[in-house]
Amino acid sequence: MLDLLIKNAHLATPKGNSPKRGAMIGQISIEKDINIGIADGKIAYIGHDAPEAAKVHDAEGHLVTPGLVDSHTHLVFGGFRQHELALKLDGADYLEILAAGGGILSTVNATRAADFDELYAKAGAFLDDMLAHGTTTVEAKSGYGLETETELKQLKVVAKLQQEHPMDVVSTFMGAHAIPQKYKQNPDDYVNLVVDEMIPAVAQQNLAEYCDIFCEKGVFDIAQSRKILKAAKSAGLGIKIHANEINNLGGAMLAAEVGATSAEHMIASDQSDIEALVKFGIIAILLPTTSFYLGKPFAPARQMLDRGAMIAIASDFNPGSSPNFNLQLSMTLACLKYGLKPAEVLTAVTLNAAWAIGRGATKGTIEEGKDADIVIWNCPDLDYLFYRFGNNQAKTVIKNGEIII
Ligand code: NIG
Ligand code: FE
């Protein structure tokens, strides 16, 4: 017998066992009057019959999709940076604030000062709220420690959340997020610290699946990024790169060279970068709220799809460039600013996003055998979910087969 039957769903879901490339990204399945059966936390039935279930939930014809997968966040941090709004309004640029010792570095001070329990409670509250907005799997990057002890503290917060919070959380080590003040004159010594001390500690304690780096002008150059990512790869970590967020240093080419799973941001990308994504099967994780919030151009998402690349869309939730974790806002912006169709964006925040963080086999679609992470929306159809914005449209959230919201 089923544990739960969701009846009368207007189901919209991508399907299949691989990330979708190019035009394939818009090929989703939409069916009305569908019943979805769940047993042992997995989807066990999809169809028009009503098999016996311990509990029945009526979706009343509302839109039902897979739970959203947020494949790029900086979840664990101390403090916030509301003072930067005034600086921005006075014309300060994101990288100028960082170069002056603010930006990421001010969050580093706050994260070093916060104790484990404080960071745990704060990140856990974010996850509660993300679930309430329809996000059921999240990637979380460290990178506000920039010293071994605090980087490990952040990653241990994620490890405890993985154990105790209903959200699925995928951990990424990003010790190379900025050059700490102490190493400003000798950044290569910091690169050595990441390579010789942090990566071995993270790998040995099994605290992350991926390693990411901020490859950017005034942050880590290509040679430094290569050194760190190669060390991470040798230690068994998957590879991600913050590439072409503001300036193009050749991060997408480096992603190809080191066999990265994803290249993230990709705003300042040219044709050769897009070709590299296609040729090497790298997923571009695009972050439209960051472009919006920094007042930067939007990534060339349509050109990427036209060339046959794979894209995912995520929130980039962090206290500086994107203090927002509502993926619904990213989804509407992706339509309006990338020129993508709702069906394309749905795949980019579910199936493709799941593949970008190593969860493609179990998450990101509503198909028999997949984890029962499902959202019922306060929407009559898929277009409506993307057309409205600013309010939370998640109505009911089912995580691992349980109705939790
Ligand atoms: O993806 N660019 C680097 N990391 C984040 C911003 C982090 C911050 O400003 O605190 C990003 O934009
Ligand atoms: Fe980021």
Image (tube, rainbow, N blue to C red):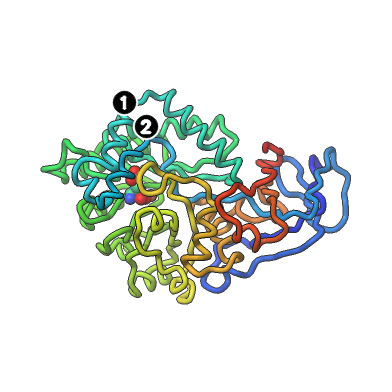
Residue identifier under label 2: 78
Quarter placement of the C terminus? top right
Q: Determine if residue 248 is in view.
A: yes
Q: Is mark 1 within 8 Å of ligand 1?
A: no
Q: Quadrant of residue 389?
A: bottom right
Res. 128 image quadrant = top right
Can you give x and y, in whole percent of width and height, for residue 117 in the image? 44, 23
| Residue at (26, 39) in percent of width and height | 105
| Quadrant holding the N terminus | top right
Question: CB atoms at circles 1 and 2 under 8 Å apart?
Answer: yes
**Label 1 neighbour load within 10 Å: few <14, some 14-19, many 20+:** some
Determine whether the beta carbon of the residue marked 2 sits less than 8 angstroms from the nearest atom of ligand 1.
no
Question: Which amino acid type corresponds to the residue marked 2 in the rendered image?
Answer: Gly
> Which structural element holds mark 2?
loop
Q: Position of residue 142 (x, y in %)?
A: 37, 40
Occupied quadrant, residue 129: top right
Cα distance between the residues tagged 1 and 2: 8 Å
> Left of 239 or right of it: where is 165?
right
Is 261 drawn above or below residue 280 in the view shown? above
Of 234 and 150, nearer the camera is 150
Does residue 15 appear in the picture of this structure?
no
* Residue for badge 1: 113
